[in-house]
Image (cartoon, grey):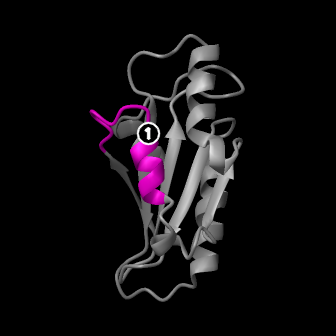
Amino acid sequence: MATVTAISTKGGGGGKKSLDYICRDAKTENKKFVTALNCSLPTAYQEFKNTREMYGKTDGVHYYHFVQSHPSGYKIEPALAHKIAVEFAERAFPGHEVVVATHIDADHIHSHFILNAVNAETGLKYHSNKFTLHDLR
């Protein structure tokens, strides 16, 4: 069974470096396993920023980074792992701009989620804490 973990984004700026990292070709089979939800992959960083500015929420946390991991040695096809991750993101973060990238270069397949902290549809800010993480799990 996959587990979800929050990755610290303290001092992470607006998420550009995190987006670049999770979408690296070598990790995602040339972006075959990268999906952008409610945004476009080439412009996701700018779209995240525009949404925060549109709603006047440019202070505080700009984005969240989560990882959904499958256990080491667990046999799952990359396409299925990515499908599970995209469906999870759609359900867990409705209305948010999210980039989902499934990494297949390690001994355990895992998917990264970079989530804009501000919901593009409502303007409400997501707040990650032990309770929201428990709900995600």
Q: Is residue 46 above or below residue 41?
A: above
Residue 64: say if magenta: no
What amino acid is at disc 1? Gly
Count of picture labels:
1
Question: Which residue shows up at 58% across the image and 72% down it?
Answer: 30
Q: Nearer the viewer, residue 128 or 35?
A: 35
User: Which image quarter: residue 118?
Assistant: top right
Q: Which residue position holds label 1? A: 15
- 90 on left or right of 53: right
Residue 46 appearing in the image: yes
Question: Which residue shows up at 48% across the image and 89% down it?
Answer: 75
> Which quarter of the rendering shows the C terminus?
bottom left
Q: Position of residue 56 (x, y in %)?
A: 56, 10
Q: Position of residue 134 (x, y in %)?
A: 41, 46
Residue 13: say if magenta: yes
User: Which image quarter: residue 35?
Assistant: bottom right
- 137 on left or right of 33: left
**Which portion, as a residue range, is magenta?**
8-22
Q: Assess disc 1: are there few (<14), some (14-19) or many (≥20) residues with their C-alpha within 10 Å of its C-alpha.
A: many
Question: Which residue shows up at 42% across the image and 15% down it?
Answer: 59
Q: Position of residue 79 (x, y in %)?
A: 63, 78
Q: Is residue 97 above or below residue 84?
A: above
Q: Secondary structure at mark 1?
A: loop
Q: Position of residue 89 (x, y in %)?
A: 60, 51
Residue 1 appearing in the image: no
Q: Is residue 107 above or below residue 41?
A: below
Q: Is residue 108 above or below residue 128?
A: below
- 42 on left or right of 76: right
User: Which image quarter: residue 95?
Assistant: top right
Question: Which residue shows up at 38% across the image and 20% down it?
Answer: 60
- 53 on left or right of 7: right
**Farthest residue, direction top:** 56
